[in-house]
Image: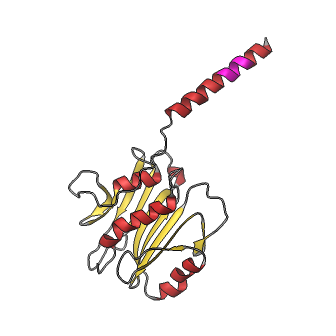
Amino acid sequence: MKRTLTLLLLALIGTALSACQRDRAPADLSPLPSVLPDPSSAGAYICDYGDAGIPAKAVELMTGLSADLEWSGHFDLGLVPVATANLCEVSNRNDPAQGAVLEIYLADLGEEWKGNVFDKRLRAGGTPMPELLPDAIGVYWAGPTADYGPVRGKANPFNEARAYLFRNGTEIGIRLKHGAAGRDNAADVLALMKLIAPTLMPGT
Protein backbone atom coordinates (compact mmCIF):
# COMPACT_ATOMS: atom_id res chain seq x y z
CA MET A 1 0.00 0.00 0.00
CA LYS A 2 2.81 2.42 0.95
CA ARG A 3 4.60 1.58 -2.29
CA THR A 4 1.46 2.32 -4.29
CA LEU A 5 1.00 5.67 -2.56
CA THR A 6 4.65 6.57 -3.13
CA LEU A 7 4.42 5.75 -6.84
CA LEU A 8 1.19 7.75 -7.12
CA LEU A 9 2.80 10.74 -5.39
CA LEU A 10 5.84 10.59 -7.68
CA ALA A 11 3.58 10.44 -10.72
CA LEU A 12 1.64 13.49 -9.55
CA ILE A 13 4.86 15.44 -8.93
CA GLY A 14 6.16 14.48 -12.37
CA THR A 15 2.93 15.61 -14.01
CA ALA A 16 3.04 18.94 -12.17
CA LEU A 17 6.65 19.57 -13.16
CA SER A 18 5.90 18.75 -16.78
CA ALA A 19 2.98 21.16 -16.76
CA CYS A 20 5.15 23.94 -15.28
CA GLN A 21 7.77 23.39 -17.96
CA ARG A 22 5.11 23.54 -20.68
CA ASP A 23 3.65 26.74 -19.24
CA ARG A 24 7.02 28.48 -18.96
CA ALA A 25 7.60 30.60 -22.04
CA PRO A 26 10.93 29.97 -23.76
CA ALA A 27 13.49 32.76 -23.63
CA ASP A 28 13.08 35.30 -26.40
CA LEU A 29 16.45 35.28 -28.14
CA SER A 30 15.58 37.98 -30.66
CA PRO A 31 18.32 40.60 -31.05
CA LEU A 32 17.69 44.02 -29.59
CA PRO A 33 16.28 46.57 -32.05
CA SER A 34 18.93 48.39 -34.06
CA VAL A 35 16.90 51.60 -34.49
CA LEU A 36 14.96 53.71 -32.04
CA PRO A 37 11.16 53.33 -32.01
CA ASP A 38 8.76 56.05 -33.08
CA PRO A 39 8.45 58.34 -30.03
CA SER A 40 4.77 58.91 -30.80
CA SER A 41 4.00 55.24 -30.17
CA ALA A 42 2.44 54.72 -26.74
CA GLY A 43 4.70 52.72 -24.45
CA ALA A 44 7.65 52.84 -26.84
CA TYR A 45 9.95 54.31 -24.16
CA ILE A 46 10.50 54.12 -20.44
CA CYS A 47 12.07 56.79 -18.22
CA ASP A 48 11.29 59.28 -20.97
CA TYR A 49 11.25 63.03 -20.58
CA GLY A 50 11.34 65.42 -23.51
CA ASP A 51 13.51 63.91 -26.22
CA ALA A 52 15.33 61.33 -24.07
CA GLY A 53 14.23 57.88 -22.98
CA ILE A 54 15.05 54.15 -23.06
CA PRO A 55 13.44 51.89 -25.70
CA ALA A 56 10.98 49.66 -23.86
CA LYS A 57 11.26 46.69 -26.23
CA ALA A 58 15.03 46.52 -25.75
CA VAL A 59 14.60 46.52 -21.97
CA GLU A 60 11.96 43.79 -22.12
CA LEU A 61 14.22 41.54 -24.19
CA MET A 62 17.37 41.97 -22.11
CA THR A 63 15.61 41.55 -18.74
CA GLY A 64 13.02 38.97 -19.75
CA LEU A 65 10.31 41.16 -18.21
CA SER A 66 7.25 42.50 -19.97
CA ALA A 67 4.00 42.72 -17.99
CA ASP A 68 6.05 42.45 -14.79
CA LEU A 69 8.34 45.33 -15.74
CA GLU A 70 8.28 48.36 -13.47
CA TRP A 71 10.42 51.45 -13.90
CA SER A 72 11.24 54.76 -12.26
CA GLY A 73 13.31 57.82 -13.13
CA HIS A 74 13.82 60.03 -16.16
CA PHE A 75 16.48 61.91 -18.11
CA ASP A 76 16.79 65.68 -18.10
CA LEU A 77 19.26 66.97 -20.68
CA GLY A 78 18.62 70.63 -19.99
CA LEU A 79 21.32 73.16 -19.16
CA VAL A 80 20.63 72.77 -15.44
CA PRO A 81 19.42 69.18 -15.02
CA VAL A 82 17.55 68.19 -11.88
CA ALA A 83 19.87 66.47 -9.40
CA THR A 84 17.55 63.47 -9.08
CA ALA A 85 17.28 62.99 -12.85
CA ASN A 86 19.38 61.01 -15.32
CA LEU A 87 18.88 57.66 -13.63
CA CYS A 88 16.52 54.95 -14.88
CA GLU A 89 15.84 51.90 -12.71
CA VAL A 90 13.96 48.81 -13.87
CA SER A 91 12.58 46.20 -11.50
CA ASN A 92 10.24 43.22 -11.36
CA ARG A 93 6.94 44.28 -9.82
CA ASN A 94 6.39 40.69 -8.62
CA ASP A 95 9.74 40.56 -6.80
CA PRO A 96 10.37 43.92 -5.10
CA ALA A 97 12.93 42.39 -2.74
CA GLN A 98 15.16 41.74 -5.75
CA GLY A 99 15.77 45.44 -6.23
CA ALA A 100 16.73 46.95 -9.58
CA VAL A 101 17.39 44.43 -12.34
CA LEU A 102 18.68 47.14 -14.68
CA GLU A 103 20.14 50.61 -14.05
CA ILE A 104 20.98 53.18 -16.70
CA TYR A 105 22.53 56.50 -15.78
CA LEU A 106 24.06 59.62 -17.27
CA ALA A 107 26.59 61.39 -15.06
CA ASP A 108 28.98 64.34 -15.34
CA LEU A 109 32.04 62.87 -13.60
CA GLY A 110 34.93 65.00 -14.84
CA GLU A 111 38.02 64.13 -16.86
CA GLU A 112 39.85 62.65 -13.86
CA TRP A 113 37.30 59.82 -13.90
CA LYS A 114 38.97 58.38 -16.99
CA GLY A 115 42.29 57.68 -15.30
CA ASN A 116 40.86 56.84 -11.88
CA VAL A 117 38.08 54.51 -12.97
CA PHE A 118 37.45 54.08 -16.65
CA ASP A 119 40.92 52.90 -17.67
CA LYS A 120 40.89 50.44 -14.76
CA ARG A 121 37.85 48.72 -16.26
CA LEU A 122 39.77 48.12 -19.45
CA ARG A 123 42.86 46.87 -17.61
CA ALA A 124 40.69 44.53 -15.54
CA GLY A 125 39.65 42.73 -18.71
CA GLY A 126 36.67 44.62 -20.06
CA THR A 127 36.14 44.47 -23.81
CA PRO A 128 36.74 47.76 -25.63
CA MET A 129 33.70 48.97 -27.54
CA PRO A 130 33.78 49.80 -31.21
CA GLU A 131 33.64 53.55 -31.79
CA LEU A 132 30.05 54.60 -31.18
CA LEU A 133 30.55 58.37 -31.05
CA PRO A 134 33.44 60.66 -32.00
CA ASP A 135 36.03 60.97 -29.21
CA ALA A 136 34.15 58.52 -26.98
CA ILE A 137 35.61 55.35 -25.48
CA GLY A 138 33.61 52.42 -24.20
CA VAL A 139 34.00 49.15 -22.37
CA TYR A 140 31.60 46.27 -21.71
CA TRP A 141 31.54 42.74 -20.31
CA ALA A 142 29.32 39.97 -18.99
CA GLY A 143 29.70 38.68 -15.46
CA PRO A 144 30.03 39.97 -11.92
CA THR A 145 31.88 43.18 -11.12
CA ALA A 146 34.35 43.88 -8.33
CA ASP A 147 35.61 47.40 -7.73
CA TYR A 148 36.11 48.84 -11.23
CA GLY A 149 36.13 45.87 -13.56
CA PRO A 150 34.89 42.40 -14.42
CA VAL A 151 35.72 39.28 -12.42
CA ARG A 152 36.83 36.61 -14.87
CA GLY A 153 36.14 32.95 -14.16
CA LYS A 154 33.46 33.62 -11.55
CA ALA A 155 29.99 32.15 -11.90
CA ASN A 156 27.33 34.48 -13.28
CA PRO A 157 24.05 33.10 -11.90
CA PHE A 158 22.13 36.34 -12.47
CA ASN A 159 23.35 36.89 -16.05
CA GLU A 160 24.95 40.22 -15.16
CA ALA A 161 26.54 42.51 -17.73
CA ARG A 162 27.91 46.05 -17.78
CA ALA A 163 28.56 48.72 -20.41
CA TYR A 164 30.10 52.18 -19.97
CA LEU A 165 30.71 54.97 -22.47
CA PHE A 166 32.87 57.97 -21.57
CA ARG A 167 33.45 61.27 -23.35
CA ASN A 168 34.46 64.75 -22.24
CA GLY A 169 33.97 63.97 -18.57
CA THR A 170 30.49 62.47 -19.04
CA GLU A 171 29.61 58.81 -18.66
CA ILE A 172 26.67 56.65 -19.65
CA GLY A 173 26.46 53.51 -17.55
CA ILE A 174 24.34 50.42 -18.16
CA ARG A 175 24.26 47.92 -15.30
CA LEU A 176 22.30 44.78 -16.11
CA LYS A 177 22.03 43.07 -12.72
CA HIS A 178 19.55 40.35 -13.64
CA GLY A 179 19.60 39.56 -17.35
CA ALA A 180 17.35 37.19 -19.25
CA ALA A 181 18.66 33.63 -19.16
CA GLY A 182 19.91 32.17 -22.42
CA ARG A 183 20.71 35.52 -24.03
CA ASP A 184 24.09 37.02 -24.86
CA ASN A 185 23.99 39.55 -22.04
CA ALA A 186 27.19 41.33 -23.08
CA ALA A 187 25.82 41.79 -26.60
CA ASP A 188 22.60 43.15 -25.09
CA VAL A 189 24.26 45.93 -23.08
CA LEU A 190 26.39 46.87 -26.08
CA ALA A 191 23.34 46.97 -28.35
CA LEU A 192 21.43 49.14 -25.88
CA MET A 193 24.39 51.51 -25.64
CA LYS A 194 24.40 51.87 -29.42
CA LEU A 195 20.73 52.81 -29.29
CA ILE A 196 20.79 55.37 -26.50
CA ALA A 197 24.25 56.96 -26.69
CA PRO A 198 23.50 59.39 -29.56
CA THR A 199 20.57 60.81 -27.58
CA LEU A 200 22.01 60.83 -24.07
CA MET A 201 25.64 61.77 -24.72
CA PRO A 202 26.06 65.55 -24.94
CA GLY A 203 27.66 67.08 -28.00
CA THR A 204 26.38 64.61 -30.58
Name the residue at 43% across, 56% down: 90
In what quadrant of the picture does the C terminus appear? bottom left
Toward the left, the furthest residue is: 40
The x, y position of residue 172, in whole percent, is 41, 73
Which residues are the magenta region?
7-11
Q: Camera-side residue: 11 or 28?
A: 28
The x, y position of residue 30, in whole percent, is 42, 50
In what quadrant of the picture does the N terminus appear? top right
Q: Is residue 85 visible?
A: no
Q: Is residue 9 magenta?
A: yes
Q: Camera-side residue: 47 or 118?
A: 118
Magenta part mainly helix, strand or loop?
A: helix
Q: Is residue 3 magenta?
A: no
The x, y position of residue 57, in whole percent, is 35, 53
* Residue 84 to residue 70: above or below: below
Q: Camera-side residue: 8 or 77?
A: 8
* Residue 15 to residue 34: above or below: above
Toward the top, the furthest residue is: 1
Q: Quadrant of the rendered structure where residue 138 is? A: bottom left
Name the residue at 27% across, 57% down: 37
The x, y position of residue 43, in whole percent, is 28, 51
17 left or right of 200 in image: right
Name the residue at 24% across, 51% down: 42
